[in-house]
Amino acid sequence: MTPMERTVFVVDDDPSVLRGLERLLRSAGYAVEAHASARAFLERAPADRPGCVIVDLRMPEIGGLDLQEELARRGFPLPLIFLTGHGDVPSSVRAMKGGALDFLSKPCDDTDLLAAVERALARDAEARAARAEKEAVRARFAALTPREHEVALLVAQGLLNKQIAAELGAAEKTIKVHRGRVMEKLGAESLADLVRLVDRIRDTT
Amino acid sequence: MTPMERTVFVVDDDPSVLRGLERLLRSAGYAVEAHASARAFLERAPADRPGCVIVDLRMPEIGGLDLQEELARRGFPLPLIFLTGHGDVPSSVRAMKGGALDFLSKPCDDTDLLAAVERALARDAEARAARAEKEAVRARFAALTPREHEVALLVAQGLLNKQIAAELGAAEKTIKVHRGRVMEKLGAESLADLVRLVDRIRDTT
DNA sequence: GGCTCCATAGGACTTTGGTCCCATGGCGGG
DNA sequence: CCCGCCATGGGACCAAAGTCCTATGGAGCC
């Protein structure tokens, strides 16, 4: 939530490009973390700092597209901006299909690059907010006991207490107790709230 | 809802390409509608038939990207597949950013094209189903009287009947009547149902 | 062996929600 | 001018949900 410094990760095997980008980005006020290879980047797992990644398409060993795939596999959330000297159409299409934010060709206008970075950071902030929100809901659900969890789901399905009782083989009274605790623990003030909370974790899980 | 025949619209200024594509697609079992220019395609507004569009990038007057923009402006929903002989990276990126489903280069493998068409049709079917669902909900809401509509929103916000009554300056009894009719007209069997229905129109509007 | 947490549940109410029947008054159309 | 729809609401209930207080029995923990 605190606006922890936004970091632009740069991955390029060409040292001069790397330094140039770093200089440009720093002078634009961003924190920069430069890596000379995808492997180096992957190893220093960028934890979960807010930011984005600028990645070269062609690199020895692990190329930009491979990196993109690997990051997707790991559930790594930062937006990717591809930057390449000899980009071809199929690569750019593959990158964009893979969710890349942009695909720029070197040499590229500093303004374009910085604009892309801003868009990427904005997208990251959005995605981050959405994730945080879902995580908060998830945390509240974690406070439920197994039974309460079951009851929460059935309540959100619109079942009556007596139906839930039948379903779970318990007395209606017991369901009322669980239900009351569910509302309390989830901080739901109304059934409408509960339904929305339940739906929100279901979408994510 | 009925699987009205899915149509592949082809827009290309090169007659031989146009004929070739038409033949290929027909032999693959698709209904095809070929147009020699973006303008021709736009004029015979393809109503709302299910399908997808294959469009050439470079065409005189209105190019593929222009067409994409115009279609977006009109809220035209079919997925676009770009097909081009001399595609460049910036164009492909722009197309993909604009929501294109794919961007293929001529000459391209028939298999690749047909696969892209299948994906496009699948995406269209999905989007179509989502739209139909939302439209159905919207239609049910249209059956509500103004007062019922207000009540529906407030109920979905989790307000008690008495709170709604205060809000609207009516007796609780009256709210109960409206509320009952709302549930009936919307076909909601429980408050949970109602909340979900209301949320669904709110997302769309 | 207490302690806490969980699940269970009864008793005794109160508050809400929902349903029937009935009634009034305005408004727009035939 | 009468009919239908809309909004309004009273009376009488019934059903469902929520709230206190109380209590039991098992599981896991220090």
Image (cartoon, coloured by chain):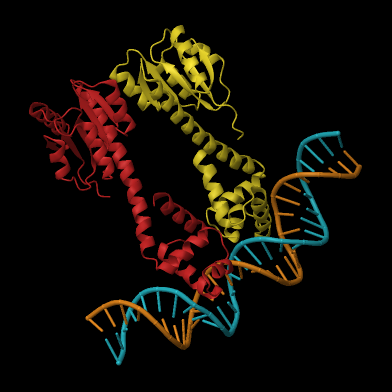
Chain colours: A red, B yellow, C cyan, D orange
In the image, is residue A10 above or below residue A169?
above
In the rendered picture of this protein, how many numbered marks are placed on residues?
A: 0
Between residue B52 and residue B61, name the one nearer to us: B52
Between residue A38 and residue D24, name the one nearer to us: A38
Side of A163 relative to C8 (left or right): right
Residue B60 appears in the picture as rendered: yes
Determine the residue positioned at 12% across, 40% down.
A40
Side of B205 relative to B57 (left or right): right
Measured from the top left, where is residue B38 in percent x and y?
Answer: 47, 13
Residue B205 appears in the picture as rendered: no
Determine the residue positioned at 48% across, 11% down.
B19
Measured from the top left, where is residue C9 in percent x and y?
Answer: 53, 80
The answer to which image quadrant residue B3 occupies is top right
Side of A32 relative to B140 (left or right): left
Measured from the top left, where is residue A64 in percent x and y?
Answer: 21, 32
Between residue A20 and residue B119, name the one nearer to us: B119
Between residue C17 and residue B2, name the one nearer to us: B2
Determine the residue positioned at 38% across, 56% down.
A137
The answer to which image quadrant residue A98 occupies is top left
In the image, is residue B105 above or below residue A56?
above
Measured from the top left, where is residue B177 in percent x and y?
Answer: 69, 56
